[in-house]
Image (tube, rainbow, N blue to C red):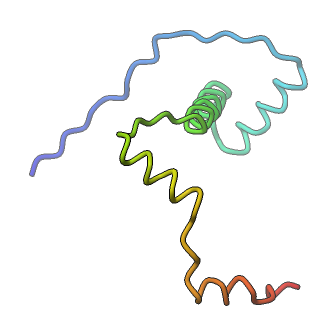
Amino acid sequence: MSSTTHPPPTRDQAINIRATRQQRDLIDHAASVLGKSRSDFMLESACLAAEDALLDRTYFVLDPDSFDQLTELLENPPDPPEGLREFLARKAPWE
């Protein structure tokens, strides 16, 4: 089995933003703590936030039968297993 390494994609697009001194200092401090450059930290943070925003609004398509099944399950969920009921009824160790 051969192993092929692929070079990372070239970063050829600029993204420019304005920030306050306090925002820049906060970002620089966080990047420094993580051992990253300001650019790497900001790009990774922005991409994570973008993915979260998009995942919160995921769109999916169901055929009519699957939609009816989903609606039925949402409106009438099955009873939880007895073991789960017992577990949830227990007092938490820190209480």
Q: Is residue 47 left or right of residue 17?
A: left
- The quarter holding residue 23 reads top right
Q: Nearer the viewer, residue 83 or 32?
A: 83
Q: Is residue 57 left or right of residue 32?
A: left
Q: Picture coordinates of residue 58 (x, y %)?
A: 52, 36
Q: Is residue 4 above or below residue 93?
A: above
Q: How many marks?
A: 0
Q: Residue at x 59, y 88 (%)?
A: 82
- The quarter holding residue 49 reads top right
Q: Is residue 17 above or below residue 27?
A: above
Q: Picture coordinates of residue 21 (x, y %)?
A: 89, 20
Q: Residue at x 57, y 63 (%)?
A: 76
Q: Nearer the viewer, residue 95 or 44?
A: 95
Q: Residue at x 44, y 49 (%)?
A: 68
Q: Is residue 93 left or right of residue 66?
A: right
Q: Picture coordinates of residue 39 (x, y %)?
A: 63, 24
Q: Nearer the viewer, residue 13 or 32?
A: 13
The furthest residue to the left = 1
- The quarter holding residue 74 reads bottom right
Q: Residue at x 19, y 39 (%)?
A: 4
Quadrant (top left/top right/bottom left/bottom right) for the C terminus: bottom right
Q: Nearer the viewer, residue 26 or 74?
A: 74
Q: Picture coordinates of residue 79 (x, y %)?
A: 58, 76
Q: Is residue 74 left or right of residue 85?
A: left
